[in-house]
Image (tube, grey):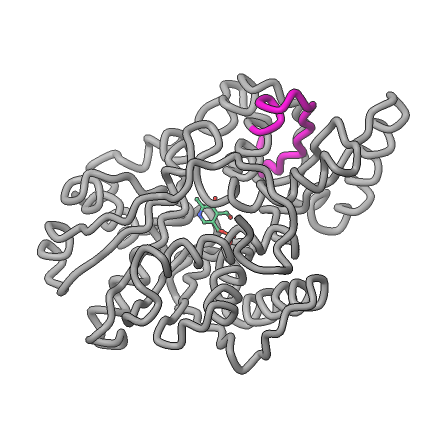
Amino acid sequence: MKIHPQEPDRLQLASLPTPIVQAQRLADHWNIDRLVFKRDDLTGLECSGNKIRKLEYVVAAALESGADTLVTIGGVQSNHCRATAAVAARLGLHCRLLLRIDAAEPSTPVGNLLLDELLGADISYHSGEEFSSGRQHLIQGVMGVLRAAGKQPYFIDMGASIPLGSWGYIRCFRELADQLGADSPVDLYCATGSSGTQAGLMLGKALFGCDNWTVTGVPVCDDVEYFQREIRRLERATVSEFGLDVGEELTPINLLDGFKGPGYGVPYAEAIAALRSCARYAGLLLDPVYTSKAMAGMLANIRAGRARRESVPVFVHTGGAFGLMACSELFDTTATGK
Ligand SMILES: Cc1ncc(COP(=O)(O)O)c(C=O)c1O
């Protein structure tokens, strides 16, 4: 059933609705009143995490356009690329991944990259420079080669954070409001990387009139000014493409600064400690790149007394467990000070 008259067509690819889980033992351990998880890490296995919600809409449009090949880009441990490869394999499409590497090509595939290969994706590796200044050229080149080979490629931008993809988290917001009650005060927290999750949740809050809810993102790269611009840009593009009646006064952009640590993908002690505590006291896994940093941010916010006392903090767990499997060196107990 459509959640909104303007909602575009979608494929049912994710296992929805994802569960809501109370983590009281973890809350007690951290000495906070309560803590609830929205388990979007359980949207599936091979396609688990937040990206599959966006891909439900984007891949529907790709099929509608007659595409037979999904092309996308991301880091070498991209959860989005792995989810795209899984969907392609499931639907009988080709998958072409352009992965960014900061050093040499990996000799042994681990984590998401291992799955990309098992799922049959064609992979090429590119430097950070090719990804930034030469990006359009790189993408056009790959699309051209595929077309020349008789394929019908469909390009999906980084993290599927495009207006169509925003519907993934508009729908997730609707699901949350149905599960928790639209009138009760709720503070949602999520990791923010390519902005689509946060922008979708913010739009959902505005569209479904949940005035007593807040949405807060924790950037895992770049800075707060960058995300103020990016989230607003994606929100405006979504509102305009789908003719949504949402004024910007309804979508304040809340961001917690200071939790990306030394940089994207570079862990730090508080985030690793949060990851360890979630595992031990709630039996659930965060990842080093996104959710552990978002959790560190949420926890610091609550502990500093900046969160509303009467509301329920809900951590939108966006997945990433395969990335965790790619960095066992972080858990050298001497390095983490455990
Ligand atoms: C596990 C995980 N959590 C959070 C995010 C951030 O979501 P978004 O890119 O929609 O901001 C990503 C991807 O970037 C991710 O892979």
Residue that protrudes farthest toward the right in the picture: 148
Count of numbered circles on the image: 0
Relative to 101, does residue 264 appear above or below in the rendering?
Answer: below
Query: Could you say which is closer to the camera, residue 260 or residue 91?
Result: 91
Q: Quadrant of residue 70?
A: top right
Q: Quadrant of residue 116?
A: top right
Q: Is 206 on the left-hand or right-hand side of 276?
A: right
Residue sitting at 26 percent across and 66 percent down? 300
Relative to 152, does residue 65 appear above or below in the rendering?
Answer: below
Query: Could you say which is closer to the camera, residue 51 or residue 79?
Result: 51
Relative to 37, does residue 213 appear above or below in the rendering?
Answer: below
Q: Specify start and end residues of the magenta stretch as a single range.
A: 87-104
Q: Is 169 on the left-hand or right-hand side of 16?
A: right
Q: Quadrant of residue 96?
A: top right
Query: Could you say which is closer to the camera, residue 264 or residue 262?
Result: 264
The image shows residue 163 at horizontal and vertical percentages of 65, 57
The image shows residue 36 at horizontal and vertical percentages of 24, 55
Residue that protrudes farthest toward the bottom in the picture: 249
Is residue 102 shown in magenta? yes
The image shows residue 16 at horizontal and vertical percentages of 42, 41
Residue sitting at 26 percent across and 54 percent down? 270
Is residue 320 shown in magenta? no
Residue sitting at 66 percent across and 31 percent down? 97
Residue sitting at 51 percent across and 44 percent down? 53
> Where's the C terminus, which quadrant?
top left
Q: Is 173 on the left-hand or right-hand side of 276?
A: right
